Image (cartoon, rainbow, N blue to C red):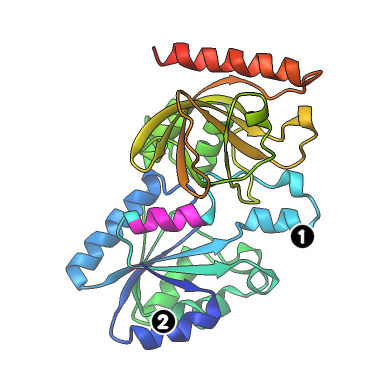
Amino acid sequence: MYLIRGTNNIELFRSNFPEISTVATIGNFDGLHLGHQQILKTMQEEADIHGLKRLIIFTEPHAQEFFSEAAGLETSKPPRIFPWQEKVRKMREFGVEFAFFLKFNNQLRSMTPEDFLNKILLRLHIKKLVIGDDFRFGANREGDFSLLKNWGTQNSIEVSNTETYEIDGERVSSTRIREALTENDFEKANKFLGRPFTYSGKVVYGNQLGGQLGIPTANLWLPKNKLPISGVYIVKALLDKKKLRGIANMGIRPTVGGESPVLEVHLLNFSEKIYGKRLTVEFLKKVRDEKKFENLNALKDQIFKDISTAESYFV
């Protein structure tokens, strides 16, 4: 997949692929859930019929994240199903040929819908544009489907929208999946995602506290984006195609004075050094909320109880 990083690289894209035409879509695509997959399926059908390539245009950060940061309200930032790097990996898995990383900043937020269409979209070899039924764009979200449709007619670009994708009468959306994960309803989240909810990250060095307590953990690098999970979970993990089981803590580790979120995974019956490797963690069930213990011995006792709970779960 070819990734276009920012508007400054549009001309490079055009010069590298002067003959291609695209069927495009625009959105956040957080989670690449079944609703998103339906859009990708529609795009693929159009691509096969008309000889086009698929192009996903996505903004980073999400608009709500941008406005929270701009207001100095980091704690009010909405959670992410996964960071943008994982989003790109998933796009590759779905066979998407092109993706456009469009930075959401003050320039983009104040851009009129007409400027967005003519200064950005019109330069991307688009022949067909497929959007979600609730898509809005431009300053103050003034751009809508009617404007897109008229613009498309003027520029020989066919614009169509997709119907809401529902399961059991409920609209599938990233917001509903985040809510389900926050409420520990993994069954619903997984159903809407079309796959188990996972987090994939590189194992990095921590403060080695787990090893000192006799409970080694794999610390996964986390982006600055918030995840919609917090606490202690029973998990499965995938490492170099090897399936493992474990217990994980997602939190700030208040007992040891932590301030930034860390995902720590203790893998059952496993003692290999795996620093630098990518670990994919699937969350199965929440055991408890994170809490501050009186001392390290109390924390250690609780961790062993959590491990015992995980072992019993897998019996």
- Which residue shows up at 43% across the image and 40% down it? 172
Amino acid type of the residue tagged 1 in the rendering: Ala
* Residues rendered magenta in the picture: 85-92
Q: Can residue 89 be found in the magenta stretch? A: yes
Query: Please, is residue 56 above or below residue 174 in the view?
Result: below
Q: Which residue is mark 1?
A: 70
Considering the numbered disc 1 on the image, is that residue within a helix, a strand or a loop? helix
Amino acid type of the residue tagged 2 in the rendering: Phe
Q: Is residue 169 visible?
A: no
Considering the numbered disc 2 on the image, is that residue within a helix, a strand or a loop? helix
- Give the crowd class for mark 2: few <14, some 14-19, many >=20 residues within 10 Å: some
**Quarter of the rendering containing residue 158:** bottom left
Q: Can residue 106 be found in the magenta stretch? A: no
Query: Please, is residue 239 above or below residue 303 in the view?
Result: below
Q: How many marks?
A: 2
Image quarter where the C terminus lies is top left
- Which residue shows up at 36% across the image and 80% down it? 125
- Give the crowd class for mark 1: few <14, some 14-19, many >=20 residues within 10 Å: few
Dominant secondary structure (helix, strand or loop) of the stretch shown in magenta: helix
Q: Position of residue 92 (x, y in %)?
A: 35, 59
Query: Does the CB distance between marks 1 and 2 fall below 8 Å?
Result: no
111 lies left or right of 244: right
Query: Please, is residue 229 above or below residue 55 in the view?
Result: above
**Quarter of the rendering containing residue 266:** top right
Q: Is residue 270 visible?
A: yes
Q: Position of residue 208 (x, y in %)?
A: 66, 36
Label 1, label 2: how many angstroms apart (C-alpha)?
A: 31 Å
Image quarter where the N terminus lies is bottom left
Earlier sequence position, callout 1 versus callout 2: 2
Query: Please, is residue 243 above or below residue 7 in the view?
Result: above
Q: Position of residue 278 (x, y in %)?
A: 46, 47
Q: Which residue is mark 2?
A: 13
